[in-house]
Structures are given as structure tokens and as C-alpha cells.
Image (cartoon, rainbow, N blue to C red):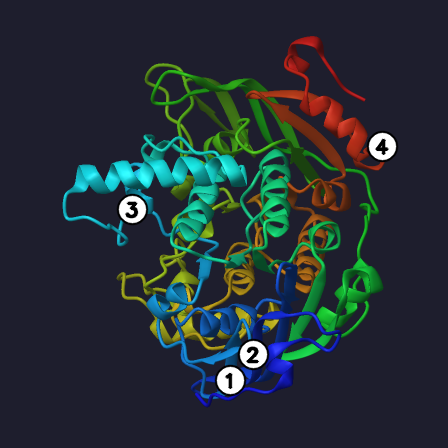
Amino acid sequence: MQTGSNTEMVQGTNGAALAVCMQGIHKHFGAVHANDGVNLSVRAGSIHALVGENGAGKSTLMSVLYGFYTADAGSIAIDGRAVEIRNAQQAIALGLGMVHQHFMLVDSLSALDNVLLGSERSMWLPRAQGSARSRLEALMASSGLRVNLDAVVADLSVGDRQRLEILKAIFRGARILILDEPTAVLTPQETAQLFEVLARLREQGSTILLITHKLKEVMHLCDQVTVMRAGRVVHECAIAETSIERLAEAMVGRKVASGRVASAREPGEARLQAEGLQVLDAMGVARLRGVSLCLRAGEIVGIAGVAGNGQSELLEVLSGLRKPAAGTLRVGTQTFGSDAGASWLTPHEARRLRLAHVPEDRHARAMVMGFPAWESAVLGYEALPAYSTRFGWMRLGAMRDATRAMMARFDVRPQNPELGSAKFSGGNQQKLVLAREIGQAPEILLVGQPTRGVDIGAIEFIHARLRELRDAGCAVLVVSSELDEILALADRVLVMNDGRITGEMPGDACDETRIGLLMCETTGQEQGVSA
């Protein structure tokens, strides 16, 4: 990578000092031109958003800045000084820190030891721990990043883990923070807490680069925004000079359809009925408390609520991944009971009954990251006649051809079945999983967090596919922590809190205020709350 310096690398066009200036950045991965002559200028002491569709080149550009990749051409200046960054250690030494969408923490270690790992200043561990604890307590007091330093990371909430990652970066001297999709897995309360922390860090002089798909958050939190599309910068401006609609159009290259599209017909017969579902966790704590629901043909039912209130356990029970402590489930004409000795639905039986499931965590439950895309695209369906002979031999060519067809229909980029599953962006991974499950023409579809970490163009596409499936007569259940998504998709809305359904109402009668009130209820089903 070439280096150099000029006036633009020292200050912006308005005279403000630049914390980061990247010029003419090019990065190729084989035939893919991920960054095509990208220029990026970030004012010191600001929060700068970097937005664009999945695969637009945002994460690649930030990986070049942080030293994970070396640019094929271009130059970088930090605080007005031309630098070469060839690895993360050099980036850290220059005052950069990066918090990834998937946290880089060791679950079995304490929060304190995770911060200390790799930055010990003494060979005597107790001395290093004591020194680190003192520094961290001072940083927590000044930044508002409160974390229990003695807690094992595996026991921390998602919000606590993210605060720990930010704290770890600041502990190592980061003045420029890169945050990759920081709110993708946070509850609304955790998001609000994070925004307070970031605003305080900005006031203290830190510079923050925010990679995100959530344009409401960009408008609320950021000072400047840069939009990328197909590896290039296509728009940049101050937040005060733009709008969500203009940013969305710049990201996708056209106007984006949004809002609610109701079903054109009344729901049909009951496809799935659950009664009195109860789930206890490993500590004996109730996670589902007598949940009952019905899914009908030609209807999208949305479940709203703050993450952690039983939605994940409900999906696991309905898809056959977990047996409840009590309750019954009817899928089509077959009934499953949880009484002693009674069998429960299994994932294999679910597929036979044409019940498909898109898990909340695509990495842990929906794909194998080490597999090529074509293997992830047939995962769980290998025994279908289209994919295997009656003697059990897999039809590998047919699997690859089917994957190409899925990629074409669902606009998965790049359309390369041989590419590793981990090499695709989050949005394209999600589209591939949806293509796999929808491709079998299910009668029931359970979807957890359908657009988590997905850009606005892919959101529009995924919503359209779910509506198509509903209109074809499928019963669709959508669990989402995004209220906008529930309001846009659901024909009927159920609200969950503390393991119970606290309310039910038609989708066209919903608004954020009504749902918010029901999210605070604790005894909805016992009281028969409905609209």
C-alpha cells in the first residue's frame, strides 16, 4: 500500500482536524473488487456512520483500517500522519480499537482476564490483575461502561459483553473506535445504554466509526454519514443535511418500499396449535409460563417483546429443538404431548410435517461456517430424493445446481456455491438460509429475527418473500425484537413478557405505544388481555 500526505489528510474541507483519512483504497479478493478507490474522511471527536448494503465493502474497508487486510493500493493517515497498518497490533499502537459484531471474548475467563489477555504488563499475574482492575474501575467511572469484572463472560448478558469489548479497546489505548453492527443483538434498553456511553465518549474526545444498517440510529446518534454501494462511496454528508429516505435510496440505488402490506384474504385452517407450554431452564427457572397460541394458513403472526422474555424458548419448543416441561402441540393432524413418556416433536418429524424453521442464530443453528455454501444450502434436507439416491448416495451435482438456483432467486451475492459459508456477509447468509427453508414449500414457517444484521435492501427483499409465502397459504410465525418489523409484517401480533403472552391484537390496530404498554404487563394470559 502506498503512503503519502497532503492537506486533505491533515484536515477536512471545513478545516476540522481529521482522525482518519483513507484515500484511493483498493482491495480485491480474486475477481471481487471489494473496495474500489474508496476515500473516507472522519473528523476527530465525532461519531461517523458507515452504511451500505451487505457486501458493499464497509467491513472490508474497516478491516483495512484495523490491519486485518492490507490494501492493494491507497493511503491512510491517522491524526494527520501518514501510516502503514499491516496488522492489528500496529493499529492498536496507533490508537485504534475494533469491536466486532461477533464478540472476540473467551467465555470461560472472567471479564477482568479477558481485558488483560494479551496486554499483561507484568509476569506476575496477581500484580497485573490488580493494576488492570484499578485502571478499569477508573475507566468505568469516567465512561459509564459498567461491567462486573469478576463475572465469567459466559454468564454476562449480550449488552454486558459489548460493554466489555469497548472497555477492552479503551483499556488498550483506543482513541478511535470502530463498532461493527453494535446494536444487532441488543435489546432496546441495552441500545439506549450504549448510545449514552458513545455520546459520553464523544464528549471526552473519542472518535467513533459506526458500521450499521439501522438508519434510525444513524439519524439519532451520528454527526456524519458515508454511504457505500458496490465497493464505492456514493454519498457522504452531515446528518443534519439528510433523511432516512435519502440514505436508503443512496444505499440501494432506488426508492425502497417500506410499510405494511396486509393479507388480501382471511386466514384459513389452524396449522399449528400449542397449549400450556412450560419450559424450565437448567437452574429450574421458568422461561415459558403456560403459553398457548394458534397459527393459521395464510397469516403472519408476529411476536413482539424485549429479547430474553421466552421468545427463543418458544421457537425451540415449536420447532422440536426442545421438549417442554408441560404442554401439548398439534401440527396438522398430529399431536405431541409432554406428559411422562409422551413423545415430542423432533426436527426430523417437523420437516416431514412440512414445518420449516429459520433459527435466530444463523451461525450456531442454521449453517456450518466451515462448509461451502452448497452444503449449508441443503443442511437438514440431504435425504430428499432430489439430493440423494434410494441407496443413500448423495447427488452432489444436484445439490450444487439447487444452490445456484436458490442464490439466483434470493439474490445471494456472490452467486458461488463453492465459496465458504463464513465468507458471505450476514445478510447473504440469512438469504441463503431463508432460500433453503422456503424452497421446500412449507405449510408452517417459524422465523427468528429474520433481518438481524441485514441491510435495508435485503430487509425489503426478505419481507416480500415472507408475504409471498403467506399469500400462498403458509402459516408464518415471526419473532423479532424490531418493532418496526412486527408492525410491517404481522397480520396478528402477540406480545411476550416474562415467559407469558401479555396481549394479542390485529396487526392493523397496533402501534409502538400499545405494544410498549403490553411489554410491561406480567399476567396477560391469566387476565385475558387482548384487543
**Residue placed under numbered mark 2 in the picture:** 22
Q: How far apart are the two marked residues, 3 and 4, measured between alpha carbons?
A: 51 Å
User: Where in the figure is residue 514, as x and y percent of width and height?
Assistant: 79, 27
Q: Foreground residue, 472 or 292?
A: 292
User: Rounded to the nearest whole Å, what is the CA distance between mark 2 and mark 1?
Assistant: 6 Å
Mark earlier in primary sequence (3, 1): 1
Residue 441, percent across and down? 58, 54
The amino acid type, in three-letter code, at marker 3 is: Leu
Q: Is residue 484 left or right of residue 23?
A: right
Q: Give the residue type that dot 1 points to.
A: Ser
Label placed on residue 116: 3
Mark 2 or mark 4, whichever is nearer to me: 2
What's the residue type where badge 4 is placed? Ala
Direction from residue 469 to residue 153 in the image, left or right: left
Q: For residue 224, which quarter of the picture?
A: bottom right
Q: Which class describes the residues within 10 Å of circle 1: few (<14), some (14-19), or many (20+)?
A: many
- The numbered dot on residue 75 is 1
